Amino acid sequence: MDKWGIIKRRVISEKAFMEQEEGKYVFIVDKKANKPELKKAIEAIFDVKVDSVNIINTKGKVKLFRGIKGRRPSYKKAVVTLKEGESLKEL
């Protein structure tokens, strides 16, 4: 898996912005990605030093649409903590 295929998108939410002040950034990543791959990809793409990576597997929610049960897709989320003094450059 290449570095551009591992990271799908950045999470934009109120909680993610609050964590950003502490040097933590949240990304939706490929389901097959692991911590060392994510660390290498973030360091290569954004040219920063990563302190730690935490991964959260989120199950899709069951929803009703006009009386028909459906399921939202499951996804993997990564919380990346950068070393002191580092930050992601705005793209």
Image (cartoon, rainbow, N blue to C red):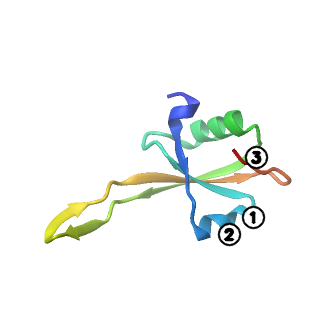
Residue 39 x, y percent position in the rendering: 64, 41
Camera-near label (3 vs 2) is 3
The kind of residue tagged 2 is: Met
In the picture, which quadrant includes the C terminus? Answer: top right
Label 3 neighbour load within 10 Å: few <14, some 14-19, many 20+: few
Q: Considering only vertical position in the picture, is 83 above or below 67?
A: above
Find out whether the residues at labels 1 and 2 contact each other: C-beta distance under 8 Å. yes
Judged from the image, the secondary structure of the residue bearing numbered disc 3 is loop
Q: Which residue is mark 2?
A: 18
Find out whether the residues at labels 3 and 2 contact each other: C-beta distance under 8 Å. no
The kind of residue tagged 1 is: Glu
Q: CA distance from mark 3 to mark 2?
A: 17 Å
- Quarter of the rendering containing residue 14: bottom right
Residue 63 x, y percent position in the rendering: 25, 68
Q: Which residue is mark 3?
A: 89
Residue plotted at (68% across, 50% down): 52
Judged from the image, the secondary structure of the residue bearing numbered disc 2 is helix
Residue plotted at (66% across, 40% down): 42
Camera-near label (3 vs 1) is 3
Q: Which residue is mark 1?
A: 22
